[in-house]
Image (cartoon, grey):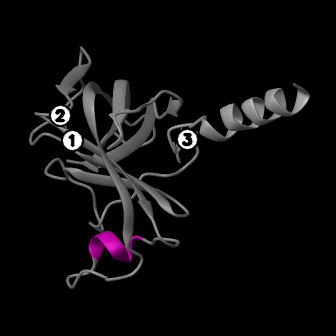
Amino acid sequence: MNRVLCVFFFSLLWACNDGDLQIETIDFDDISIQTCESTITINSNLFFKINGTEALILELQSGLLKNEVSLDTIVSTVPGQSNLIYRIFSGSVTSNYFCDAIPLTEPTVLEEIEASNGEVHISTILNPADSTQFQHTIELSNITLVNEQGERITDTRINAFGTVTTSQ
């Protein structure tokens, strides 16, 4: 009887599947925003954050950055108006991956997840140290990332995307 129970117990453990969820935490809060442009302008719309073998790519809706103080938070929906993509690479990635005229072949993308829901919030203030510059704080809200297996990634710590500065 003990053997039957042991075999049943081990069969049950072996049959359990965690869904092969590779992503436990998405945390880009302490990572700086990067762009391919040497100077960020109000026409800039592609921003990314790189964390080793991971990248978070934000493509803003055209016209969201303005050289004027915003009285209200500007909102752009994801997907649709703006897009947010999370990528896992086969090795460490650098800004050259996104910025080179001829795309790099390495590292390769192992997984790409496009946000299926959420919002981008932008608040703009006049730079207190330089009245010719505007600081745009970009935040993400209610972002939903669902992988190919249909599993929602719930521990997404990507609310504060960061701040970029433009000049008049």
Q: Quadrant of residue 163?
A: top left
Distance in Å between CA atoms under marks 2 and 3: 20 Å
Q: Is residue 86 left or right of residue 114?
A: right
Query: Over which residues does the magenta segment extend?
Result: 95-99
Q: How many marks?
A: 3
Q: Earlier in the sequence, mark 1 or mark 3?
A: 3
Q: Secondary structure at mark 1?
A: strand
Query: In this figure, which residue is indicated by the disc labeled 3?
Result: 27
Return the residue at label 1. 83
Residue 151 figure quarter: top left
Q: Residue drawn 19% across and 53% down?
A: 44
Q: Is residue 7 left or right of residue 62?
A: right
Nearer to us in this view, 147 or 61: 147
Quarter-of-image position of residue 109: bottom left
Where residue 39 sits in the image (x, y, percent)? 28, 62
Considering every residue shown, the one lying at the far right of the view is 2
